[in-house]
Amino acid sequence: MRKIRAIEKVLIANRGEIAVRIIRTLREMGIISVAIYSDADRTALHVRMADEAYYVGPSPSSESYLNMGKIIQIAKDSGCQAIHPGYGFLAENSEFGRLVEKESLIFIGSHPESISLMGSKTEARKTMKDLGVPVVPGTLYPAKDIKELIKEAEKLGYPVLLKADLGGGGKGMRFARNIDELKSFYELSRSEALSSFGDPSIYIEKYINEPHHIEIQILGDNYGNVIYLGERECSIQRRYQKVVEETPSPFLDSESRKIMGEIAAEAARKLGYRSAGTMEFIVDKDKNFYFLEMNTRLQVEHPITEMVTGIDLVKCQVEIASGKTLQYTQESINPKGCSIESRIYAEDPDNDFAPSPGKILAIQNPSGFGIRDDCGVYEGYEIPIFYDPLISKLISWGNDRREAINRMLRALSEYYIIGVKTTIPFFEKILKHPEFMSGSYNTHFIDKLEKKKEEFEETRKIAVIAVGLREIMDKSESIRQDDRKISSPWKTIGRWLYLQSRL
Ligand code: ADP
Ligand code: ADP
Ligand code: MG
């Protein structure tokens, strides 16, 4: 039986740009938005923009944005019918989904059972394999001990990747080229898994060479209707984390795109999947694709799919949660043009991407045709140290890839942020790179870029030393020639100290 439940007021269990993004759709739908905030977030943009805002707790997220009981209590006290978890924090916490539903509130997300099933990478791999989806070769259960891992690695062949079973955000992941590396990373990977996810379970996968990360956006309702909304190419990564995303993938052809989409949607249908979700795949250079994991939530990079399909994914999530049938059929999905996203962080690209929290003294946001700036800050705002230092997601759209790139570069050149270091200059470097321009990159792109930078730095240092030595030699020579002067070693040492400061 189809039951529609009216959603008139929604609590957003998140912060920053994603909370702002959800508030915007709710307002368009005529739904009242309720924000929550920690001590550090009293003046945050999402608090200013929401219709109502309530204090949730101290700054550390364990005491605020992860406090399930308090969040549900605020939702009930303020008269909300539903909770949207955004991404990160409680978005993939099945216990939270269950608690919300137990309190007769609507969880705007997937079934808690889907969340827990996909929460374990090995469980997810087993499930997908059974559903006929190709998975990356590797183990389907957490390893008992190092001996077992060594045996499995020998069967798979090196290199392999050690992965945390409950992993996310690239944490606990280690690349091993041989048995010695596998042995030395085993404990490291386990302890990182334990500290990040509260569980040390790890397993291994074969490392796919020259890989592409390509993911399929899925939407499903409560009645078995599932569609796919094209793919996103997310191979521009740093330390296994996405930096730039684009759609469509410049690597896929229409045939492989269709096969991947259909396989992903079919698997989701068989799972009874509801709401927005993403199936991530690793694609090798011959376009063989393998299931990587499923994210049972709205993805950070979802806006690029919205830009080419014209579909508001948050609106769909709310409609699905209220019990409506999916408003779109597969045939009605006709992506148009290209879209790119740059994740702009308060980080210093010249200092190993160290976080750069602080006050935004001045900001000029780009705009204009084909530009979307999902920004979570404002002038005078102080970026807190407690959370992800994401400032904004800058998104461009163009009729074709070249137009989307040029538009992104134009918008980046307009973007001024004074007060904190940002990753803006890094994106300019990426987008202007011939390999990016030609669309021929894979996940090694940034590693290669950084290696080149290191090599350049080395050459620069050698050049500075060579010039310095020449100067010192010339000086010593002139001192020697002038025998009336007494040569002081301090002159030479002083020169060295000066040179050191320039290295
Ligand atoms: P994707 O959605 O592409 O898989 P990530 O895995 O990088 O991207 O996104 C989830 C991550 O985003 C979380 O691990 C968390 O660190 C971070 N995150 C969670 N909430 C927020 C937020 N409100 N603002 C910025 N970053 C957040
Ligand atoms: P997380 O949960 O941390 O997002 P994923 O399993 O999604 O971890 O992997 C993150 C990234 O690591 C991928 O996007 C890809 O770049 C790389 N990666 C993961 N597994 C493999 C593999 N088997 N071979 C090659 N690269 C991989
Ligand atoms: Mg992933």
Image (cartoon, grey):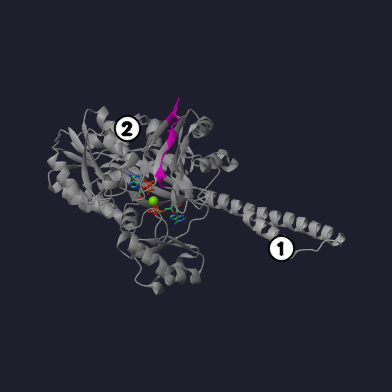
Residue at (56, 42) in percent of width and height: 429
Q: Secondary structure at mark 2?
A: loop
Tell me the quadrant of the picture where the N terminus can be found: top left
Viewed as shown, does residue 382 lie left or right of 401?
Answer: left
Tell me the quadrant of the picture where the C terminus can be found: bottom right
In this orientation, which residue lies closer to the viewer: 90 or 376?
Answer: 376
Q: Amino acid at mark 2?
A: Asp
Image position of 182 with respect to 468: above or below: below
Image position of 89 with respect to 394: above or below: below
**Does any atom of ligand 1 lie closer than 8 Å to the CB of label 1?**
no
Residue topped by disc 2:
312
Q: Position of residue 2 (x, y in %)?
A: 15, 36
Query: In the rendered structure, which segment of residues is drawn in magenta?
Result: 357-371
In this orientation, which residue lies closer to the viewer: 385 or 238?
Answer: 385
Residue 7 falls inside the magenta stretch: no
Viewed as shown, does residue 405 lie left or right of 271?
Answer: right
User: Which secondary structure is most common in the magenta stretch?
Assistant: loop
Residue at (22, 51) in percent of width and height: 67
Q: Is residue 165 visible?
A: no
Residue 99's disc number: none
Residue at (29, 37) in percent of width and height: 46
Residue topped by disc 1:
490
For the residues labelled 2 and 1, the Cα–Cα distance comes to: 70 Å
Q: Secondary structure at mark 1?
A: helix
How many residues crowd mark 1 within 10 Å: few (<14), some (14–19), many (20+)? few
Of mark 2 and mark 1, the one earlier in the sequence is: 2
Q: Which residue sits furthest bottom?
A: 147
Image position of 269 with respect to 93: above or below: above
Q: Which residue sits furthest front?
A: 484
